[in-house]
Amino acid sequence: MMNYLIGMDIGGTNVVCGLVDTKGKLLHKIKQPTEASKGSSYVFDKIGLMIEDLVLQAGIEKSQVSVIGVGTPGFIDPIKGITLFAGNLRWTQVHTADEISRRTGLPVFIDNDVRMYVYGEAVCGAARGYEHVLGITIGTGLAASMINNGQLYYGGGYMAGELGHILMPEISYRCGCGMTGCLETAVSGTGIARQAREQLENGRVSIMQEWLKDSSLEALTAADVSKAFDAGDPLAVEVMNHTGMLLGKGLAAAVTLYSPDIIVIGGGGALAGERLFASMREQLKQSVYSGYWDRLTIKTAEMLDDAGIVGSALAAWGRLGIAR
């Protein structure tokens, strides 16, 4: 009888569950709104029902599912299975693994969602075949994870990889973490929009003002900045180049410390592509010893939203083997 795995990505907006085989092939997935404001018990009840639906829709028996792997945002204790703090879920000290296991009757392992995303790309996506993988995701924030020979690097307190909280003297924005100058306040989807908005408020002229018409500047998005970049808008070009430069400086620190074979870039911000990456590469090349640069490959993620589902499923499968 074939073994199956379930991978899950719990986000502030949606919960996605996927059925995965032990080779990492995604067979079926379903998605529902998280509704985190209704509390963690409500979310876990929903997840229990989603897993029943997933198994039913896939036409398999629940007894064929070996393990559930879960990626959740925030600070995670993957050994105890506790979400220590996840701001966008409003969870603090939530026993996520136990709660989902109690509702499903299956073993559950949890980890940080970005680690699971990068693990998916390392095993089955853009970084497969590379031994030392640095993965970053650019979304509402900026996060990173490092994998060496298939093993996730956690650091003390499971806190390694917070690239977004490297302080930059060029940045004056206050971060939600309480510090001022964190990289992710500028290098993120929200950060790109923030930089453009600030310049427009200071009187800079841009095609983006025409697009917004009567809308508030608060409506401006990173996608608008990309579109304006393509139209040759000087402000948009300046913002993207500056953001890429900052990212290159941040990555230079990570490359020098970790010496990855490959950097994989994912998240919604990766859709900016060369608009962002050209200046990033130029800055990174200038900021690291040539021995690091000469052996480095940089790729965008291949699996899009599925990386986290596949990564969490396979990571849990590996941990189940160790647990046994």
Image (tube, rainbow, N blue to C red):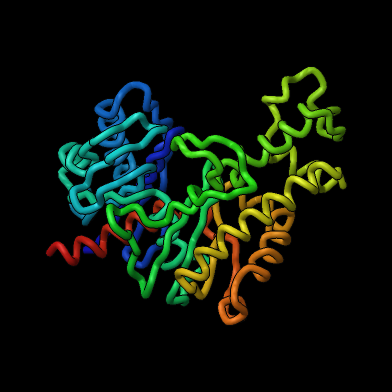
Residue 302 x, y percent position in the rendering: 55, 61
Q: Residue at x 86, y 44 (%)?
A: 234
Quadrant housing residue 40: top left
The reply to whether residue 207 is visible in this rendering is yes
Q: Residue at x 30, y 46 (%)?
A: 76
Left-right relation of 88 to 211: left
- The quarter of the image holding the C terminus is bottom left
Q: Residue at x 71, y 50 (%)?
A: 242
Left-right relation of 267 to 131: right
* Position of 278 relative to 260 (above/below): above
The residue lying toward the viewer, choosing from 316 and 30, is: 316
The residue lying toward the viewer, choosing from 244 and 152, is: 244
How many numbered discs sit on the rendered protein? Answer: 0
Residue 248 x, y percent position in the rendering: 63, 60
* Position of 248 relative to 216 (above/below): below
Question: Seen from this angle, which residue lies furthest top?
Answer: 214
Left-right relation of 187 to 238: left
Q: Residue at x 40, y 38 (%)?
A: 15
Left-right relation of 39 to 11: left
- The quarter of the image holding the N terminus is bottom left
Question: Seen from this angle, which residue lies furthest left?
Answer: 324
The residue lying toward the viewer, choosing from 73 and 316, is: 73
